[in-house]
């Protein structure tokens, strides 16, 4: 039986590797790597191992202009692809993502996309970051408190400290608590309830319109949402 690849064997774009190199050398990350490796050997884990760091591969550090923070990957077959809120082509659009699309439509008009694949956003500088990057099949939150949160805290801190003018969209208390390290003098932080239909208040937040207005004010290209 071949071993599943360790997370560090998975592709991560070079600029992110440079920024996060110190994290890879810390004890917690070694323990996390070993935990995740064993999980892939013995359980059904999402996303596929090669897509654990997909968000970092699609959106290089120097290109990040917007961050949308999720919690952990989808735990159903064929859904998770390493980008927060995004699903693979051909997968039905989950309820939270449908509300996200409704808000985009309310901000800019147009029609609701048929595909829930958000790679088109990632390629424009939208970092679609989950706080936890792996999950067991059918067991939401099963990989929480194993070290991923420490790693993604370091990601957010690096973006806050080393860049300027990033838009952070923080939806729900979990994301907002995680975003407390962001320097609001250097960046735009947008808070709203979670887009889940079980929450109330996300629709009408106008985050996508506000993000583009902020980018335009900084003479940056707006995101085609």
Image: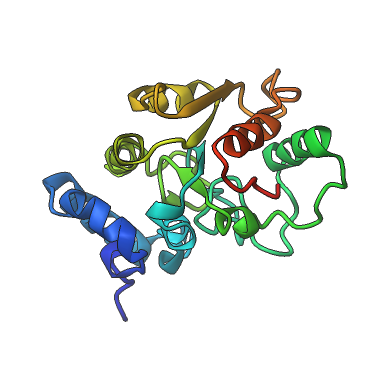
Whether residue 81 sits left or right of residue 143 in the image: it is right
Q: Is residue 174 above or below residue 122?
A: above
Q: Is residue 17 above or below residue 3?
A: above
Whether residue 162 sits left or right of residue 99 in the image: it is left
Q: Is residue 44 visible?
A: no
Residue for point 40% across, 28% down: 186
Identify the colour scheme used: rainbow
Whether residue 81 sits left or right of residue 6 in the image: it is right
Residue for point 42% across, 68% down: 50
Residue for point 29% across, 75% down: 3
Give coordinates of residue 183: x percent, y percent. Answer: 36, 25
Q: Quadrant of the N terminus?
A: bottom left
Quarter holding residue 9? bottom left
Whether residue 60 sits left or right of residue 201 in the image: it is left
Give coordinates of residue 58: x percent, y percent. Answer: 49, 61
Q: Return the residue nearer the eye: 156 or 135.
A: 156
Q: Return the residue nearer the eye: 115 or 122.
A: 122
Q: Return the residue nearer the eye: 108 or 17.
A: 108
Tally of marks: 0
Q: Is residue 43 above or below residue 136?
A: below
Give coordinates of residue 41: x percent, y percent. Answer: 34, 66
Q: Is residue 110 above or below residue 17?
A: above
Residue for point 72% across, 28% down: 197
Give coordinates of residue 219: x percent, y percent. Answer: 57, 42
Q: Is residue 180 visible?
A: yes
Residue lying at the far bottom of the rendered structure:
1
């Amino acid at each position: 039986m071949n071993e599943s690849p360790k997370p560090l064997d998975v592709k991560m774009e070079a600029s992110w590797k440079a920024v996060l190199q110190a994290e890879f050398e810390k004890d917690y990350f070694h323990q996390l790597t070993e935990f995740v490796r064993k999980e892939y050997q013995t359980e059904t884990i999402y996303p596929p191992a090669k897509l654990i760091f997909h968000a970092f591969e699609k959106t290089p550090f120097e290109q990040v202009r917007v961050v949308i923070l999720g919690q952990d990957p989808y735990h159903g077959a064929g859904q998770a692809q390493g980008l927060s809120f995004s699903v693979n082509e051909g997968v039905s659009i989950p309820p939270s993502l449908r509300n996200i699309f409704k808000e985009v439509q309310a901000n800019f008009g147009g029609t609701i996309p048929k595909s829930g694949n958000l790679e088109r956003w990632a390629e424009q500088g939208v970092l679609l970051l989950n706080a936890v990057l792996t999950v067991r099949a059918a067991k939401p939150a099963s990989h929480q408190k194993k070290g991923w949160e420490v790693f993604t805290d370091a990601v957010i801190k690096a973006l806050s400290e080393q860049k300027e003018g990033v838009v952070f969209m923080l939806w729900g208390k979990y994301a907002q608590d995680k975003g407390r390290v962001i320097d609001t003098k250097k960046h735009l932080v947008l808070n709203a309830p979670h887009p889940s239909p079980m929450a109330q208040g996300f629709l009408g937040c106008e985050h996508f319109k506000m993000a583009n207005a902020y980018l335009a004010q900084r003479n940056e290209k707006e995101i085609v949402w």
